[in-house]
Image: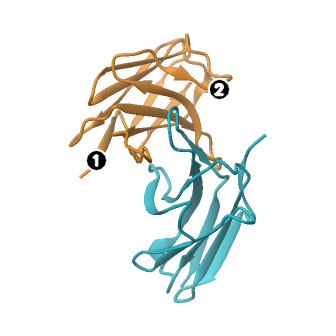
Chain colours: A orange, B cyan
């Protein structure tokens, strides 16, 4: 149980294009989903927290107009990197939570984005 | 500011030995701690967690120790195996509204055959 998937697992795009990454909770309903970014040999950095049906809450320094997050249902959240540039190349990881007292998060397998 | 950090960037152990990975945290309000294992190109994998009302918790071959007095967390892996080779992260959470995880820097565990 508590499986989270991401699609695509790997994407290469040209600079200036937009890329959408999907995060799905496969066997549970996620009241909250989180998006992280991880650069090589670095830790996970939280980008934003999204609750179903409401606007995402972005961490300081993360541009909300560049990283568009949509949490349209209890099983799907999407992250769109708009006008991607090489510096946006990174490993993007989502997690999903059912809430609860300890808000345990279940992580997806990650999406490797490479912007040429 | 508040931070979660690890004492050592890499740890090399002999197969069969026990491994101890340490983590320091500084947010005294944190009340839930988790250890994750991350293999190359994959997402974090939950290993074990501990709540602040406990000081020790055991799983299969793993034990987490929490010392709230000195804000220290450790992960012990018994009889380390090659499959344990990965990057390990500690993370802290403050439960309640707007709770979120803060990850430590990560330590690479390398198991020598």
What residue does disc 1 label?
A3
What residue does disc 2 label?
A87
> Rounded to the nearest whole Å, what is the CA distance between mark 1 and mark 2?
30 Å
Expressed as whole percent of the image width and height from the top left, the position of residue A37 reads 56, 35
All told, the count of numbered labels is 2
Expressed as whole percent of the image width and height from the top left, the position of residue A54 reads 40, 16
Residue A88 vertical position relative to residue B86 in the rendered view, above or below: above
Q: Residues within 10 Å of mark 2 (few under 14, many from 20)?
A: few
Mark earlier in primary sequence (1, 2): 1
Q: Residue furthest left?
A: A27
Expressed as whole percent of the image width and height from the top left, the position of residue A115 reads 55, 25
Element at label 1 = loop
Q: Which mark is residue A72?
A: none
Q: Residues within 10 Å of mark 1 (few under 14, many from 20)?
A: some
Q: Residue furthest bottom?
A: B16
Could you say which is closer to the camera, residue A110 or residue B58? B58
Q: Quadrant of residue A99?
A: top left
């Amino acid at each position: 149980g508590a499986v989270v998937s991401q699609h695509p697992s790997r994407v290469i795009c040209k600079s200036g294009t937009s890329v959408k990454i999907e995060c799905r909770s496969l066997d549970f309903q996620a009241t909250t989903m989180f998006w992280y970014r991880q650069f090589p040999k670095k830790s996970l950095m939280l980008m934003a927290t999204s609750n179903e049906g409401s606007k995402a809450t972005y961490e300081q320094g993360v541009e909300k107009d560049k990283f568009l997050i949509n949490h349209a249902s209890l099983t799907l959240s999407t992250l769109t990197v708009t006008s991607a540039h090489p510096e946006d190349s990174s490993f993007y990881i989502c997690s999903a939570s059912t809430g609860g007292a300890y808000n345990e998060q279940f992580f997806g397998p990650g999406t490797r984005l490479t912007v040429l | 500011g508040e931070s979660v950090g690890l004492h050592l960037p890499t740890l090399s152990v002999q197969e069969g030995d026990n491994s101890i990975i340490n983590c320091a945290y500084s947010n005294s309000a944190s009340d839930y701690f988790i250890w994750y294992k991350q293999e190359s190109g994959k997402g974090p994998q939950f290993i074990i967690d501990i709540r602040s009302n406990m000081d020790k918790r055991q799983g299969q071959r793993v034990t987490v120790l929490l010392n709230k007095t000195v804000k220290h967390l450790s992960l012990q892996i018994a009889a380390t195996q090659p499959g344990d080779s990965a990057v390990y992260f500690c993370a802290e959470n403050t439960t309640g509204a707007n709770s979120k995880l803060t990850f430590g820097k990560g330590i690479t565990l390398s198991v020598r055959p």
